[in-house]
Structure formats: structure tokens, C-alpha cells
Amino acid sequence: MAVVPAYLLGTLPTALVVGRGYGRDLTTEGSGNPGASNAWRTLGRRAAAVVLMGDVGKGALAAGMGWAIGGRALGVGCALAAVVGHVAPVTRRFRGGKGVATLVGAALVLLPGAMVVLGLAWALIVRISGVAATGSLVVAAGLPVAAALTGQSPMEVAMWAAAGVVVVTRHRENIGRLRRGEEPSLSD
């Protein structure tokens, strides 16, 4: 079944591989999150761009594989599996990233128009606030809404919602810091 390879694809540790190239470990530096935002703060723009492309690519490949094998529903199922793989990788004791870029990659394949709009919203929010987590939460919450508005099946909407819940849940510490006004900006 395609969901298992999609999960395993999600477990590929893009940020850890890039960090090792710099002689660094992103799970012990900065926020400790193996993702593009921490790579930005810890290693700089170039490293963050590579991490971002790798994580987006995982989601896109998983969604595209599922769609090609079994249609949109399997594409979204594989997208969800890749996000879960990124967030809870069995290879790293279920300690992974936050899943945003992997979710975005999947959405670029399955909901490209909506993802362009949500991507612009993310960029505007981050530009104004300087805080990546706020924009990421908007994307996670916006995808099931976008799926519903574009007429996708209730099952697909539910799977986008499940992926969004995974991403939002992984941001619980960020949400707490946002409420307290303590969330670091990308420039911190």
C-alpha cells in the first residue's frame, strides 16, 4: 500500500542531513526543531532554503505518488502519512519537525490554486509579524477550508483537517509563546 512508503518518505530527516553538512545538529541547537525556520535562525538562508525544498519535496512526492496510484483520495492519504512521518518519525523515536513544509508540498500537488493563495497569506503574515508560526497555523487551518470551498469530497476535507490538526498540535508550544508575546521572529 502507498501510505507506508509515503510515511517512510516523510521520515527522511532533511534538516538533520543539511545540518550535518554544516557540522551542526538542529535538534540540539536553536529551537531544537528540525525544520526550515530553525535552519534559518541557526544556519542561515541558504541552508533553510535547502531544508524547505527537501521537506516540500517529500510532501509533493508522497501526494503525487498516491494520486498517480489511486486517485485524489489516496493522494491526500499519502500526504497525511508523509506529514505524520515528518512529525513522528519511527527512525527518531517519534521526534520530528512540525510538518508545515511537507503539508505545503502535498497541497501544491493536490490543491495548487488554494496553496498559492495560502502561501501569499503566509508570506504577508510573516512579513508583517516576522513570526513563521503564525503563518504556518493559518496554512494548516486554511487547507481543509480550501478543500471544502473547491468542492472536494467530505473524506478529502476530513483528511486535510486531520493533517492540519497534526501541524497545529505540533505548534502547541509556539501557540503558548504567541499568547505570551514571547515567540521569536525569524530575525531572532
Image (tube, rainbow, N blue to C red):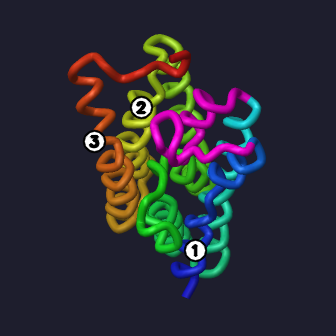
Residue type, label 3: Arg
Q: Secondary structure at mark 3?
A: helix
Seen in the picture, residue 33 relative to 128 is either above or below; the reply is: below
Position of residue 168 in the picture relative to residue 86 (left or right):
left
Position in image of residue 84 (x %, y %):
44, 64
Asked if residue 53 shows in the view, the reply is no
Mark 2 or mark 3, earlier in chain: 2
Position in image of residue 40 (x %, y %):
62, 30
What residue is disc 3 on? 172
Q: Secondary structure at mark 1?
A: helix
Q: Magenta stretch: residue 72 in it? A: no
- Magenta span: 23-45
Q: For the residues marked 2 and 1, what is the alpha-carbon distance in whole angstroms?
A: 25 Å
| Image marks 2 and 1: residues in contact by CB distance under 8 Å | no
Q: Which mark is residue 103?
A: none
Q: Magenta stretch: residue 33 in it? A: yes
What residue is disc 2 on? 133
